Image (cartoon, grey):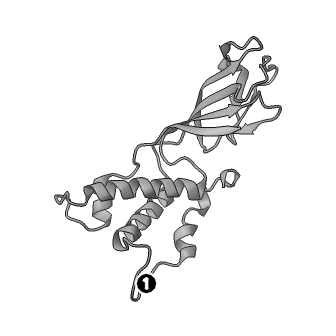
């Protein structure tokens, strides 16, 4: 079983929003490239910390056959299954009728009631499930966490700092994400 991201998400925070958070002049473009990279870094780390898709993106899950039990499509939330391709017993690539499968409320892919899986050639990656995850609406706690992370990166551009550094307690900062974590993907 292999999960591959086939389309990365767009940044969910705008350059203007982050510049306002950092209290930077909106007309000064000298740091825009750095800030754009920091936005993507914070977004990727937020997704890693929560196990949920931060922003719309596409994924593909490769299986050696159809699952005998529900299989989690991660990261969630799943917006839709876009395609299910499989190798028939003759080795030909086939498209599964999407009405024969479903995504549960927990985000698991399974056979729909009363349906049976088609026969599949025994081959690594014989079944490919392509799905869209994420949402344009990013939880406010994730946005807050990303802004804090970008602010920290902006103020401390090196791995070590000399002198006295005050920081928000880690329990508060990382605790912001607790309410949206998908523990199946951590």
Q: Is residue 49 visible?
A: yes
Residue 115 horizontal side relative to residue 82, left or right: right
What residue lies at 79% left-to-right and 20% top-to-bottom? 117
Residue 168 location, x and y as percent? 48, 78
Looking at the image, is 157 positioned above or below residue 138? below
Residue 72 sits in which quadrant? Answer: top right
Residue 79 horizontal side relative to residue 56, left or right: right
What residue lies at 40% left-to-right and 63% top-to-bottom? 147
What residue lies at 68% left-to-right and 12% top-to-bottom? 92
Tag 1's secondary structure?
Answer: loop
Q: Quadrant of the N terminus?
A: top right
Looking at the image, is 5 positioned above or below residue 99? below
Near mark 1 (Cα within 10 A), the count class, few <14, some 14-19 or many ≥20, is few
Residue 30 location, x and y as percent? 20, 60
Residue 2 location, x and y as percent? 67, 38
Total labels drawn: 1
Residue 170 sits in which quadrant? Answer: bottom right
Residue 66 location, x and y as percent? 77, 27
Mark 1 highlights which residue? 166
Q: Is residue 17 visible?
A: no
Residue 21 sits in which quadrant? Answer: bottom left
Residue 110 horizontal side relative to residue 162, left or right: right
Q: Quadrant of the C terminus?
A: bottom right
Looking at the image, is 35 positioned above or below residue 130? below
Question: Residue extending furthest bottom?
Answer: 163
Question: Residue extending furthest left?
Answer: 27
Residue 145 horizontal side relative to residue 87, left or right: left
The foreground one among 102 and 131 is 131
What residue lies at 69% left-to-right and 20% top-to-bottom? 86
């Amino acid at each position: 079983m292999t999960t591959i991201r086939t389309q990365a998400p767009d940044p969910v925070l705008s350059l203007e929003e982050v510049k306002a958070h950092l209290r930077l002049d909106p007309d000064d473009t000298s740091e825009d490239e750095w800030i754009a990279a920091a936005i993507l870094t914070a977004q990727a780390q937020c997704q890693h910390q929560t196990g949920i898709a931060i922003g719309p993106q596409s994924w593909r899950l490769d299986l050696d056959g159809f699952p005998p039990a529900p299989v989690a499509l991660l990261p969630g939330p799943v917006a839709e299954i876009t395609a299910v391709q499989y190798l028939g017993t003759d080795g030909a690539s086939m498209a599964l009728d999407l009405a024969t499968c479903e995504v549960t409320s927990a985000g698991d892919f399974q056979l729909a009631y009363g349906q049976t899986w088609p026969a599949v050639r025994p081959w690594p990656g014989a079944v490919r499930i392509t799905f869209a995850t994420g949402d344009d609406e990013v939880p406010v706690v994730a946005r807050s966490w990303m802004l804090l992370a970008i602010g920290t990166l902006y103020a401390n551009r090196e791995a070590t700092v000399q002198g006295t550094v005050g920081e928000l307690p880690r329990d508060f900062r990382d605790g912001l994400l607790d309410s949206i974590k998908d523990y199946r993907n951590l």
